[in-house]
């Protein structure tokens, strides 16, 4: 596949946990040959099962290219075998800096210098991860949102030694595949989306801890309220509309004072053992006996319906 100046036919998935398996399904759907490397003996069975379960959702979203097939996948646990002939690497190892540094250095030694290595890290900084690489200029973060085969977002940011060309090529690559990449102008722990959801979850925990509401009601406050609007326009544009004809300027003039008092009153809960138990009990009650696997399957079915509806009503600025 020709994407800008890149010719990419084979993508390597290094690390085949939930994120890696989802990425594998996505790249297969886009017509690539996919080679998976993971030391776990269960990796092949797990990924094949994941791809099989993900394929119908990708079909419903019309995300499967004409030449795509779930059988265009190979499993080679040994990195030196798996990386032969690949043109793009998506790394998904566990979120440990020492492991990531060592793994990226190994990958770097085995590839031609112009092959991009994109890390799915959810919060680590590439400037630290790339330090042991001989060719750090080709290392970049391409952080997806779970599950990557469905959610469009990819956060792209380079490290101190990443070249501007690599960042641009990664942006072009994900865009060409139908993703919605966003470019971070500088590194920050947790990137953007995880920091946003961490901020919301912190206050959600505080509200439970303070006895304001149950876990289920706090979740409902999000899904039945701001979450609906944010899915369409995000917080800034939502508040712009909240200002009426005067837009965001009018909104801030009218409500910035009250909102500042809310910010000042936001909680900083400590996840004690008792509070963790309270949250887990609340989630278990809301789950109603359904397993994590069943809940995830329900989520993915609903995600597909939501994304199809959103595509039909997509706003111009999105």
Image (cartoon, helix red, strand yellow):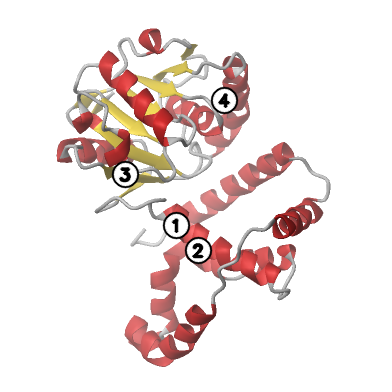
Residue 273: assigned label: none
Foreground residue among 127 and 21: 127
* Residue positioned 46% across, 60% down in the render: 196
Report the quarter where the C terminus lies.
Answer: bottom left
Q: Height in image: 127 above or below 252?
A: above
Secondary structure under tag 2 reads helix
Mark nearer the viewer, 3 or 2: 2
Mark nearer the viewer, 3 or 4: 3
Residue 195: assigned label: 1
Query: What residue sits right under mark 2 in the picture?
Result: 199
Marks 1/2: CA–CA distance: 6 Å
Q: Is residue 9 shown to the viewer in this render?
A: no
Tell me which numbered mark, 3 or 2, is placed earlier along the sequence.
3
Mark nearer the viewer, 4 or 2: 2
Instruction: State yes or no: discs 3 and 4 in contact (Cβ < 8 Å).
Output: no
Instruction: State yes or no: discs 4 and 2 in contact (Cβ < 8 Å).
Output: no
Marks 3/1: CA–CA distance: 15 Å
Query: What residue sits right under mark 4 in the picture?
Result: 51
Query: What residue sits right under mark 3 in the picture?
Result: 156
* Residue positioned 38% across, 51% down in the render: 189
Give percent across and percent down for residue 312: 48, 54
């Amino acid at each position: 596949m020709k994407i800008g100046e890149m010719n990419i036919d084979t993508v390597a998935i290094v690390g085949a946990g939930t994120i890696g398996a989802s990425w594998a399904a996505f790249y297969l759907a886009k017509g690539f040959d996919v080679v998976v490397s993971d030391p776990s003996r269960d990796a092949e069975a797990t990924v094949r099962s994941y791809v099989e379960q993900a394929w119908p959702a990708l079909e419903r979203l019309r995300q499967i290219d004409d030449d795509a097939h779930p059988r265009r996948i190979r499993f080679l646990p040994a990195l030196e075998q798996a990386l032969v002939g690949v043109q793009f690497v998506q790394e998904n190892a566990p979120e440990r800096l020492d492991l990531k540094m060592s793994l990226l250095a190994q990958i770097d030694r085995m590839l031609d210098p112009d092959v991009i290595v994109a890390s799915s890290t959810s919060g680590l900084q590439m400037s630290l991860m790339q330090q042991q690489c001989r060719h750090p200029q080709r290392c970049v973060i391409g952080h997806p949102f779970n599950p990557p085969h469905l959610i469009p977002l990819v956060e792209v940011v380079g490290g101190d030694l990443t070249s501007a060309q690599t960042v641009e090529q990664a942006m072009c690559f994900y865009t060409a595949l139908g993703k919605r990449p966003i470019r971070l102008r500088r590194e920050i722990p947790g990137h953007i989306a995880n920091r946003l959801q961490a901020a919301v979850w912190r206050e959600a925990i505080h509200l439970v801890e303070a006895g304001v509401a149950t876990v289920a009601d706090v979740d409902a406050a999000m899904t039945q309220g701001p979450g609906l609007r944010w899915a369409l326009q995000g917080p800034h544009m939502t508040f712009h509309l909240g200002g009426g004809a005067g837009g965001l300027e009018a909104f801030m003039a009218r409500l910035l004072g009250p909102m500042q008092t809310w910010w000042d009153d936001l909680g900083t809960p400590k996840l004690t053992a008792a509070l963790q138990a309270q949250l887990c009990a609340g989630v278990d009650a809301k789950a109603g006996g359904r397993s994590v696997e069943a809940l995830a399957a329900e989520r993915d079915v609903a995600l597909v319906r939501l994304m199809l509806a959103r595509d039909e009503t997509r706003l111009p600025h999105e």
